[in-house]
Image (tube, grey):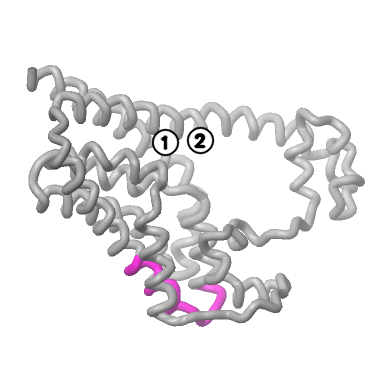
Amino acid sequence: MFADIYTSILLGLSFSNIWICALVIFSLQTSQKSTGIGYIIGRFIGIVIFVLIFHIIGNSIRISNFYLDILSAISILLFGAYFAYKYWIEQNREDSHHNLYSKLSENCEHNCNSCIISKNPEIHQYCESCSDGDKNCSSEDIQIEPLTRETRKLWGKESNKEQKTGLIFGAFLGIVRGSAMCGRLVLLLPLAIKGSLMNSFIVGASFAFSSSIYPIAILIFGEYLLKLVKYRRAIIIVNSVFLIFLSFYYLNHAFKSL
């Protein structure tokens, strides 16, 4: 039971750029905080409902706990290993490449075609360091674009579309987003099937809360919390290591149940 809760919390903390980037934009840089709060509440409700529905469906199929634990062990191990690799090994390699070629972009005129490095496909991705770009972080992601529209106007990203805001509008988007299938939510499903309905509720609520803790803190503490963003990489790596250890717990638990 407690291992399931720990896993749910750690999975929730393994957030992606969209949570720090987009939520900072629409909640801090505009007056649409009610929309942001509604989105977080709606997403919480959507995730919990999704997990409970899957618990009911899964229990009707009657899958052995052995297979559920094996599935949890493998999926959590792969997830933890992927994020550890992405934010540790791969990021170190990209940082070294970036430092090597950064001097070549000093004379760029905010146009990637004018960069020397743009001629080399292997390092073309680093051309973004001298490009204005047409997006403000992930704020134009289709899932949260309506929430960030007003902010993008303030940032010079004009839009003629009509802006909808408010607690109810944000909650509706949050419910839709929370009940949608995503990678981390899929990892919760084996945990949601096991145990009682209350256990599934706690698992879903733990994930929903931990995956919202950063934007909630941003709404409360604002720009002061942004100073912690530089530690995001370390947080994710430590988080991934804990997930890998938890995967071995589920593997051990599976064979003990035989």
Q: Residue at x 30, y 43 (%)?
A: 10
**Relative to 188, residue 247 above or below:** above
Q: x%, y% of residue 73?
A: 26, 27
Among the 4 quarters of the image, the one containing residue 234: top left
Specify the farthest residue to the front: 60
Label count reads: 2
Q: Inspect the image, locate mark 2, and give the three-letter code of the amino acid beneath it.
A: Tyr
Q: x%, y% of residue 140?
A: 62, 61
Among the 4 quarters of the image, the one containing residue 216: bottom left
Q: Residue at x 49, y 53 (%)?
A: 229
Q: Is residue 40 or residue 194 the one in the foreground?
A: 194
Q: Is residue 8 left or right of residue 104?
A: left
**Relative to 201, residue 7 above or below:** above
Q: Inspect the image, locate mark 1, and give the three-letter code of the amino acid beneath it.
A: Ile
Mark 2–mark 1 Cα distance, whole angstroms, equals: 7 Å
Does dot 2 land on a helix, a strand or a loop? helix
Q: Quadrant of the C terminus?
A: top left
Does dot 1 land on a helix, a strand or a loop? helix
Q: Residue at x 82, y 39 (%)?
A: 103
Q: Which mark is residue 87?
A: 2
Among the 4 quarters of the image, the one containing residue 192: top left
Q: x%, y% of residue 54?
A: 23, 47
Q: Is residue 16 or residue 159 the one in the foreground?
A: 159
Residue 33 part of the magenta segment: yes
Q: How dense is the environment of label 1, judged by Cα within 10 Å: few (below 14), some, or many (20 and up)?
A: many
Q: Residue at x 67, y 76 (%)?
A: 153
Q: Is residue 109 left or right of residue 146?
A: right
Q: x%, y% of residue 194?
A: 14, 39
The region drawn magenta spans 28-42
Is any part of residue 217 visible from this angle?
A: no
Q: Is residue 207 left or right of residue 64?
A: right
Q: For mark 1, what is the residue? A: 237
